Image: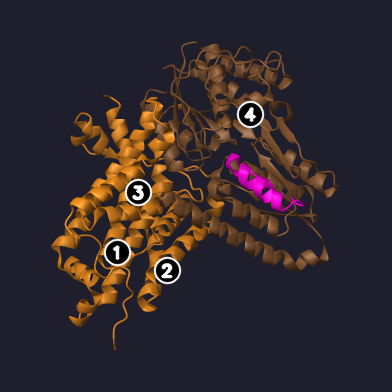
Chain colours: A brown, B orange
């Protein structure tokens, strides 16, 4: 009850902010027709993780096209109640709208149908339309690397993973992390705790503590705040940063961070709209294109660092992949190998099974 | 078993902000004022507390500043509902919305700054007791303060003259006024106390629970505190029980997940709320009638002249 209330008011205040912004811009817009670009964020801009990185992308657009674009964002929009926030942007003259969380998929498609002249870009989704493009990043490449590091660095052979929501993107990340760890340490085990929220620092931290209490000595996370990293550090345990470089939160206990860099993509897509060349598409790239970057490898012996760097280089060149065949699912069945020697992007984007060796079931 | 103290400590940290905020709101509601702005006061306390701690490089000062900021916001609420006799529900909701915005503004320059932990307090001898000693007698100082606040509120409401007057004002402000009690002044004290504690709970979030500031970090805890007050039905002990039960289940469900016991995590996440509803039902079915909210709760007081 409480959370729903909160979400309601957060989105309300967000809408008010947009109203204020759009009213304020009404006058100068007459003089010069600027392209209005809108963003919907699932967390606050200040989460210093996921939404923060998207906002860096928004700022990059403003910098790349000075005087030609106007950007607006609505932050902390609950996924279940995002439709009116998206529509709000569409109605107030935004011609390009980025909706930056998996749960915005259906609402985005729904609003897109009503506004055929507005172009939408939905992050991490798999459904497209004439005016809805999708884009995502191969975060699982980074997770494969940190899996290898964790597998080498663990002393208890138990790794803790704080998950947000049981969606394919997160499942694929867990699998990649586990496969990476197992490739260097066959005895490694993984424990998973779901926060069922993208952003709730208190709960994320509690989940990390529960995992540490259960014997995990390395923590990684697929939620948006630095709380799990910080809690691990408070107990003298190692952890990873997520979405942005989180070194400052635990300089002595961070191993590395997986960094999302949306800026080049956002600039490219805005340019496409300005030049009238925008088309619906699906883009899924990672280390190779720089959409996924790795933070500095620290607090680890040189040999582990070398292993991480080699893995990163091999992934970048395409020589290896997080999901090289054969991939065996939890139930012992080998997954059909559709991409030659590795799984295809579609198989990764729609991943809904744990690989063999992970205990527990995916919450449905 | 050696992890039990850790688990208990996690439960106490998770429950402490809820407990503190709920204690404050409990006093406010006993005086007949419903302040739905707990979430707003809490988040302003979190932002101000963190900002003050960074600026002065003192977490203790930050916690004091956070508490005072919560109180300042409650003073705005008091002005509205006591002087202008506005609708308490609407004013409280407005306070939450304002608080969320204001907190973002206050914390703007402090997003993403880390902060060192406050060293835990160890009570000599008692902390040597196996299992419980380590969990209860080693903690942050606000946790100990919260134990003191429980005693203070219970004693203050039930054993002092002021507590009696406060409850009388809450039960029937008309009668209290007729008897010559300063209704508004007593309510002002209750509202400010509620704000002080909500702010303290907020500062606990940003300086002890998770040591950074981020907008929206209270994540609905103010609303849970409000629910706990309903759950308490006028009894401080029930409020304490509710807070620790809620914290306990929250942490237990995370352990259940990490231990892969095979229940859906969405169900486990909803469990604390389901348990709260179940406990409320149980209390209202088995409980005595008449116990619960104060008689004049939520009604604006406009004395006849």
> Mark 2 vs mark 4: same chain?
no
Q: Indicate the secondary structure of the residue bearing disc 3.
A: helix
Q: CA distance from mark 4 to mark 1?
A: 51 Å
Q: Which mark is residue A349?
A: 4
Instruction: Identify the subunit bearing mark 1.
Output: B
Q: State if disc 4 and disc 2 touch (CB < 8 Å).
A: no
- Among the two numbered marks 3 and 1 on one chain, the one whose residue lies closer to the N terminus: 3
Instruction: Identify the subunit bearing mark 3.
Output: B
Q: Which residues are magenta?
A: A98-118
Q: CA distance from mark 3 to mark 1?
A: 17 Å
Q: CA distance from mark 4 to mark 3?
A: 39 Å
Q: Indicate the secondary structure of the residue bearing disc 4.
A: helix
Residue situated in front as seen by the camera: B88 or A288: B88
Q: What residue is pinned by disc 1?
A: B28
Tell me if mark 4 has few (under 14), some (14-19) or many (20+) residues whose alpha carbon lies within 10 angstroms of its own: many
Place of residue B38 in the rendered image (x, y in percent of width and height, measured from the top left):
39, 58
- Among the two numbered marks 2 and 3 on one chain, the one whose residue lies closer to the N terminus: 3
Q: What residue is pinned by disc 2?
A: B91
- Among the two numbered marks 1 and 2 on one chain, the one whose residue lies closer to the N terminus: 1
Up the image or down, B225 lies above or below A335; here it is below
């Amino acid at each position: 009850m409480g959370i729903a209330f909160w979400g309601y008011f957060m989105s309300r205040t967000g809408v008010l902010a947009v109203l204020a912004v759009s009213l304020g811009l009404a006058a100068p817009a007459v003089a010069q027709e600027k392209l209005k670009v809108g963003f919907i964020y699932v967390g606050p801009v200040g989460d210093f993780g996921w939404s923060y990185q998207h906002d860096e992308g928004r700022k990059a657009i403003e910098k790349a096209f000075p005087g030609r674009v106007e950007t607006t964002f609505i932050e902390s929009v609950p996924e279940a109640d995002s439709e009116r926030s998206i529509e709000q942007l569409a109605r107030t003259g935004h011609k390009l709208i980025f909706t930056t969380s998996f749960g915005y998929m259906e609402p985005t498609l729904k609003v897109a149908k009503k506004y055929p002249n507005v172009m939408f870009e939905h992050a991490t989704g798999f459904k497209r339309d004439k005016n809805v493009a999708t884009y995502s990043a191969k975060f699982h490449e980074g997770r494969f690397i940190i899996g290898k590091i964790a597998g080498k660095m663990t002393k208890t052979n138990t790794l803790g993973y704080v998950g947000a929501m049981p969606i394919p993107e997160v499942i694929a990340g867990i699998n990649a992390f586990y496969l990476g760890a197992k490739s260097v340490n066959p005895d490694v085990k993984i424990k998973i705790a779901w926060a069922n929220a993208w952003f709730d620092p208190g709960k994320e931290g509690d989940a990390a503590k529960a995992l540490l209490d259960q014997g995990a000595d390395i923590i990684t996370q697929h939620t948006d705040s630095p709380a799990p990293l910080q809690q691990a550090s408070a107990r003298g345990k190692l952890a990873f940063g997520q979405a942005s470089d989180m070194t400052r939160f635990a300089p002595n206990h961070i191993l590395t961070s997986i960094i999302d860099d949306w800026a080049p993509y956002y600039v490219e897509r805005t340019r496409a709209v300005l030049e009238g060349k925008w088309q619906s598409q699906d883009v899924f790239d990672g280390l190779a294109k720089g959409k996924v970057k790795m933070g500095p490898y620290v607090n680890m012996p040189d040999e582990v660092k070398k292993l991480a760097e080699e893995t990163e280089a091999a992934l970048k060149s395409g020589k290896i992949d997080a999901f090289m065949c054969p991939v065996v699912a939890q139930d012992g069945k080998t997954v059909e190998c559709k991409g030659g020697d590795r799984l295809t992007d579609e198989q990764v984007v729609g991943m809904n099974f744990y690989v063999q060796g992970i205990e527990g079931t995916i919450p449905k | 078993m050696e992890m039990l103290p850790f688990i208990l400590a996690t439960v106490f940290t998770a429950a402490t902000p809820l407990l503190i905020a709920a204690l404050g709101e409990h006093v406010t509601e006993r005086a007949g004022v419903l302040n739905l702005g707990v979430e707003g006061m809490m988040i302003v306390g979190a932002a101000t507390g963190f900002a003050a701690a960074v600026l002065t490089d003192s977490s203790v000062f930050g916690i004091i500043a956070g508490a005072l900021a919560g109180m300042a916001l409650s003073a705005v609420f008091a002005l509205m509902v006591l002087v202008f006799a506005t609708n308490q529900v609407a004013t409280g909701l407005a306070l939450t919305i304002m608080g969320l915005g204001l907190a973002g503004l206050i914390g703007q320059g402090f997003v993403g700054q880390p902060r060192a932990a406050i060293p835990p307090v160890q009570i000599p001898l008692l902390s040597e007791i196996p299992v419980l000693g380590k969990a209860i007698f080693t903690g942050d100082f606000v946790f100990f303060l919260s134990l003191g606040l429980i005693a203070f509120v219970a004693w203050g409401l039930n054993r002092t003259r002021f507590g009696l007057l406060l409850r009388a004002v809450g039960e029937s402000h008309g009668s209290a006024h007729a008897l010559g009690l300063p209704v508004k002044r007593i309510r002002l004290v209750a509202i400010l106390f509620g704000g002080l504690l909500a702010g303290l709970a907020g500062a606990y979030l940003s300086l002890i629970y998770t040591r950074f500031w981020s907008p929206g970090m209270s994540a609905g805890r103010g609303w849970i505190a409000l629910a706990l007050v309903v759950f308490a039905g006028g009894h401080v002990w029930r409020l304490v029980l509710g807070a620790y039960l809620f914290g306990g289940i929250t942490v237990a469900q995370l352990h259940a997940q990490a231990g892969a016991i095979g229940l859906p995590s969405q169900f486990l996440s909803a469990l604390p709320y389901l348990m709260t509803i179940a406990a409320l039902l149980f209390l209202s079915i088995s409980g005595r009638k008449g116990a619960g909210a104060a008689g004049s709760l939520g009604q604006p007081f406009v004395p006849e002249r």
